[in-house]
Each structure stands twice: as structure tokens, then as C-alpha cells.
């Protein structure tokens, strides 16, 4: 029951109306019996500083930060975790003992979650796309001790910058999607991760398409695990296509839930909720 003592956690972004975080986080807060609720607050760029400073002064216990503010909140935090600094993105904030914002990033742990039971040590991987999520994915693959990562992008400048960011930590190369070498890489890859939004259900995007087009995928075979970060639709067209080729497939829902579990643990100083509580809440909702 919401009472006069109830405090809250919020998602800040623009837009936020499509987000599944309130569904899974409220299910988790209810499971823990905490007097807290989770709400989504749309916030324009020009209002971000005012909104974050104001939330510090009322009963807000923590925040999730989403597009387009994941980088802009750096200036508004007095404490930033090493992983958020490395990824240049913050997705979770809480109030520290000095009543200031402390920021971290839970996307790497979220990404790794469904891969933990698979042995990927010394395996070869491909990452499609070179935006914000690709950074977390590369860090996750480094943590899992893969031997080689090839990042395939349509954007030369962002792929070059991404590669520079992880130099000397793993064998890493960047290629454009029309490079003929991509076919060999796909044929031999143990894991392919899609971090482009291609296949996502939005008014702007066509859902029944594959990243970089059909011909890009002609050498895909059943030994490859295909992981799509997109969670709506689940499965995406890419995952259906890959399953038809005999591949193991992973959708983005597990990552979404696992990063949410880690955020909740950050806000509550270590409380844990079973994965299925948040996962079932989303599945029942969709
Ligand atoms: P982002 O920073 O905008 O990066 C998107 C990347 O995809 C960029 O490299 C972009 O290239 C490329 N791209 C965009 N449209 C493309 C197209 N039509 N064809 C080929 N490449 C294209 O976005 P992000 O934050 O990394 O998120 C990417 C996706 O991951 C989204 O679908 C998001 O929902 C999903 N995601 C899921 C989770 C989860 O928990 N499951 C977490 C994070 C992100 P350009 O630079 O050339 O535009």
C-alpha cells in the first residue's frame, strides 16, 4: 500500500513510456516488502540538472538513467564507479551518505548473465554495432575470457573510437559491414551479438529485417550462438532466422532483467531478488 511514508525510485530518460523497468522493479520491490515504488519520469535534456538536483531534495532513493542521458549524468555525480568510468555511461544512481548522487553501470553484469553457463573461454566472437551497448558487450566478453572480438559496424569513426577504448585488453578488430572478410568471420564465430536496433519493434523501424541485410548472414551455421540485445519482439527476426539454421539463440530479456537485479541490489545495499520474480512480471505483462 502507498502511504505517507512511501519513498520512490525513478527511471529518467526521454522517452520512457515504452520501458519495462517499472513492471519488473515494482514486482521486485513488492516481493521484498519494501515501502518503495518505481516510476518512470520523462525528462528533456535541458531539464536534467534541475530534475536530478530536485530529486535529491525529496524522497527519492535511486534512479535508473536511460537514453539520452547516460553520459550527461556524469557531471551531476559526486562518485562514479570504475566500470561506469570505463564504459563512459551511467545507468544507475543512488544517494550517498553526503546526500549526493553516486553512479554505476550494471549493463555488463546484465549482458553476461545468460552466457555464464556456456563455456566461452578462448572462443571467437562478433559484435554488430558500435554504439553504447557495444561497449558493455565488449567489456563483458573480455570478462568472460574470449580470445577474439570483431566489431562490425556501418560507422567507421565510432568503430575506430570503440576499438581504441579497449586496446591491449583482448585481440580486437573493427570492420565495416561491407568488408568481404566478414563472411569468414561469421563462418567461424562461436558467438555473434547484435547491438544494433535493427529488428526492434518501434514505429520507426521495420521488424522483419536482419542487421546489414540477408546476404550478410549467408555463412551463418549451427555452431554459432546468436545473442540479440533486443527484447521486443522476442524472438526478433534475427533470432528466428538463426534458430532455423540450428543456432542456439538468446534474446535481450535476460540482460534487461539481470541489469535490473543488479540496479536493485545497488539501491538496497545488496538485497537480492530471484531472477524469475522480475522475469515473470515482464512475461505476464507482454
Ligand atoms: P546506440 O548507442 O544508438 O548504438 C546503436 C548502434 O547500432 C550504432 O553503432 C549504430 O550505428 C548502429 N545502427 C543503428 N541503426 C542501424 C541500422 N539500421 N543498420 C546498421 N546499424 C545500425 O544504441 P545502444 O544504446 O547501443 O542500443 C542498441 C540496441 O541495444 C537497442 O536496440 C537497445 O534497445 C538494445 N539494448 C538492450 C539492452 C538490454 O538490456 N537487453 C541494453 C542496452 C541496449 P550509427 O552510429 O551509424 O548510427
Image (cartoon, rainbow, N blue to C red):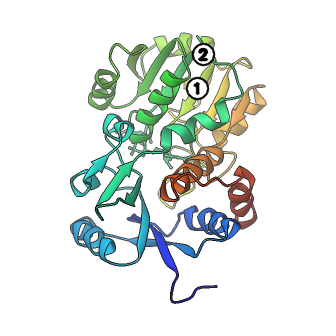
* Mark 2, other Cα within 10 Å: few <14 / some 14–19 / many ≥20: many
* Quarter placement of the N terminus: bottom right
Do the residues bearing badges 1 and 2 touch, measured as CB atoms within 8 Å? yes
Whether residue 146 is visible here, answered yes or no, is yes
Q: Is residue 168 rendered to the left or right of residue 223?
A: left
* Mark 1, other Cα within 10 Å: few <14 / some 14–19 / many ≥20: many
Nearest the eye: 267 or 216: 267
Q: In which quarter of the image is residue 129?
A: top left
Please name the residue shown 58% across and 42% down the image: 209
- Which quadrant of the picture is home to ligand 1? top left
Give me the disc on residue 189. Answer: 2
Provide residue 214's location: percent of width, then percent of height: 59, 30
* Residue to which mark 1 is pinned: 192
Please name the residue shown 59% across and 52% down the image: 261
Q: Is residue 272 rendered to the left or right of residue 10?
A: right
Provide residue 249's location: percent of width, then percent of height: 71, 33
Q: Is residue 57 rendered to the left or right of residue 6?
A: left
Please name the residue shown 40% across and 77% down the image: 59
Residue 135, compared with residue 126, is above or below; it is below
Give the secondary structure at mark 2.
loop
Amino acid at each position: 500500500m502507498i502511504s505517507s511514508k512511501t519513498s520512490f525510485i525513478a527511471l529518467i530518460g526521454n522517452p520512457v513510456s515504452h520501458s519495462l523497468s517499472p513492471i519488473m522493479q515494482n514486482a521486485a520491490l513488492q516481493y521484498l516488502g519494501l515501502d518503495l515504488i518505481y516510476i518512470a519520469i520523462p525528462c528533456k535534456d535541458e531539464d536534467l540538472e534541475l530534475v536530478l538536483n530536485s530529486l535529491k531534495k525529496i524522497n527519492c532513493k535511486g534512479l535508473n538513467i536511460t537514453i539520452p542521458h547516460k553520459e550527461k549524468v556524469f557531471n551531476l555525480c559526486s562518485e562514479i564507479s570504475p566500470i561506469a568510468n570505463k564504459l563512459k555511461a551511467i545507468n544507475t544512481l543512488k544517494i550517498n551518505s553526503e546526500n549526493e548522487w553516486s553512479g554505476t553501470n550494471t549493463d555488463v553484469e546484465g549482458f553476461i548473465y545468460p552466457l555464464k553457463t556456456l563455456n566461452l573461454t578462448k572462443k571467437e566472437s562478433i559484435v554488430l554495432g558500435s554504439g553504447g551497448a557495444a561497449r558493455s558487450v565488449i567489456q563483458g566478453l573480455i570478462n568472460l575470457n574470449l580470445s577474439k572480438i570483431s566489431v562490425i559496424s556501418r560507422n567507421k569513426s565510432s568503430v575506430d573510437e570503440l576499438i581504441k577504448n579497449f586496446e591491449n585488453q583482448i585481440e580486437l578488430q573493427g570492420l565495416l559491414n561491407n568488408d568481404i572478410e566478414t563472411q569468414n568471420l561469421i563462418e567461424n564465430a562461436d558467438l555473434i551479438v547484435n547491438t544494433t536496433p535493427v529488428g526492434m519493434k518501434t514505429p520507426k523501424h521495420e521488424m522483419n529485417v536482419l542487421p546489414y541485410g540477408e546476404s550478410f548472414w549467408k555463412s551463418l551455421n549451427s555452431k554459432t550462438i546468436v545473442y540479440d540485445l533486443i527484447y521486443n519482439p522476442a524472438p526478433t527476426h534475427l533470432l528466428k532466422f538463426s534458430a532455423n539454421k540450428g543456432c542456439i539463440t538468446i534474446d535481450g530479456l535476460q540482460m534487461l532483467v539481470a541489469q535490473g537485479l543488479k540496479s536493485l541490489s545497488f539501491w538496497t545495499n545488496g538485497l537480492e531478488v530471484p531472477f524469475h520474480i522480475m522475469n515473470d512480471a515482464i512475461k505476464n505483462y507482454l
